[in-house]
């Protein structure tokens, strides 16, 4: 972690290690309790919630049609991140793919079946609210990647992007009510490609990945789409660290790359930095190692609420990057 203080060109490129082994510890069959660890079958979207006294990693499992949660802690002594027991947040959602959190802890999801939904922070285990649906809304066309800020959600479409929009911006709540007042919402932000993948918000910029080696950007207020980089092989998910850096998972290059994120004016970057070596990464999220999330020592000398996973890599002196690939 200390080496991340070096200039990006001088940093080593560490290999990712497993945080959650979805095939090692799971329970199947009629004797399994409802609360038993179900493992992971096809993890897709990731999102991390940093609360006042705990941090939670949410994982969308497309095959299980469920969203799972794991409390995260970090060990300053060993420089590792630990994931707690699996908890089921929602199930029976369909082909759930993308996840995003707003500043209040509300959890949003997309399904390849054609839904964009919301689970309110104060009742995550309640029935989900479907905000937007392919039934009657052409801008919902196999939605995949998802991002959120304090007011809006943004999703990418995996089909008909050049007709129905590759990147869509919409209100994050009260969709039916607000549609009457703002008929231009949901709004097509980009239709420059047929199929988009990951999306992330960095301050006033929205970045999204496309086909081949491309990363694009557009202002949250709209406007021209900028080609930010073509330095990838098969870019998928992306994440912003809340400061200055964007991370992009490249499935084919088996790596996670970093590049600047806070552009006053969007522009092309000359090169991207290989931050992590990983086996076909798909989604990526950032966990900040703040004091409230430190693991607590027990009488036996180890850590409470721990699962024997290890950290993937240091991003800055205060953050760790998490990725889960299938």
Image (cartoon, rainbow, N blue to C red):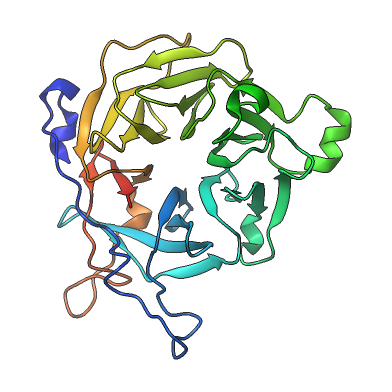
Q: Quadrant of residue 14?
A: top left
Q: Quadrant of residue 95?
A: bottom right
As displayed, is residue 152 above or below residue 123?
above
In what quadrant of the picture does the N terminus appear? top left
As displayed, is residue 91 above or below residue 37?
above
- Residue found at the very far right of the displayed protein: 180
- Residue at image position (48%, 80%) is 35
Q: Quadrant of residue 240?
A: top left
Asked whether the viewer can see residue 264, the reply is yes
As displayed, is residue 20 above or below residue 14?
below
| Image x and y of residue 67, in percent | 51, 61
Q: Nearer the viewer, residue 310 or 60?
A: 60
Asked whether the viewer can see residue 289, the reply is no
- Residue found at the very far bottom of the displayed protein: 31
| Image x and y of residue 162, in percent | 60, 22
- Residue at image position (11%, 24%) is 10
- Residue at image position (36%, 43%) is 282
| Image x and y of residue 319, in percent | 30, 41
As displayed, is residue 69 above or below residue 250?
below
| Image x and y of residue 186, in percent | 73, 31
- Residue at image position (72%, 51%) is 130
Q: Please give the count of numbered marks on the rendered protein.
A: 0
Left-right relation of 108 to 243: right
Left-right relation of 99 to 2: right
């Amino acid at each position: 972690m200390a080496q991340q203080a070096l200039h990006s060109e001088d940093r080593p490129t560490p290999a990712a290690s497993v945080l959650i082994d979805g095939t090692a510890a799971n329970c199947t069959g009629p004797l399994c309790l409802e609360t038993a660890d179900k493992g992971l079958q096809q993890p897709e979207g990731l999102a991390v919630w940093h609360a006042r006294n705990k941090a939670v990693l949410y994982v969308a499992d497309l095959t299980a049609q469920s969203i799972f949660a794991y409390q995260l802690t970090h060990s300053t002594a060993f420089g590792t991140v630990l994931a707690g027991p699996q908890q089921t947040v929602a199930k029976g959602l369909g082909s759930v793919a993308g996840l995003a959190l707003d500043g209040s802890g509300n959890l949003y999801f997309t399904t390849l079946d054609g839904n964009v939904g919301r689970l309110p922070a104060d009742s995550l285990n309640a029935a989900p609210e479907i905000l937007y649906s392919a039934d009657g809304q052409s801008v919902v066309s196999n939605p995949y990647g998802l991002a959120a800020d304090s007011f809006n959600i943004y999703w990418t479409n995996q089909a008909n992007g050049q007709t129905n929009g590759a990147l869509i911006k919409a209100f994050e709540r009260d969709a039916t009510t607000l549609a009457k007042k703002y008929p231009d919402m949901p709004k097509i932000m980009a239709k420059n490609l047929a199929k988009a993948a990951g999306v992330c918000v960095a301050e006033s910029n929205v970045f999204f990945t496309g086909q081949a080696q491309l990363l694009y950007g557009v202002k949250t207020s709209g406007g021209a789409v900028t080609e930010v980089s073509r330095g990838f092989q098969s870019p998928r998910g992306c994440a912003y660290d809340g400061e200055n850096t964007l991370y992009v998972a490249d499935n084919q290059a088996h790596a996670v790359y970093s590049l600047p994120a806070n552009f006053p004016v969007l522009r092309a970057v000359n090169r991207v930095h290989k931050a992590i070596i990983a086996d076909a990464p798909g989604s990526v999220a950032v966990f900040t190692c703040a004091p409230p999330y430190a693991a607590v020592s027990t009488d036996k000398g180890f850590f409470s609420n721990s699962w024997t996973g290890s950290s993937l890599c240091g991003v800055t002196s205060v953050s760790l990057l998490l990725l889960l690939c299938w």
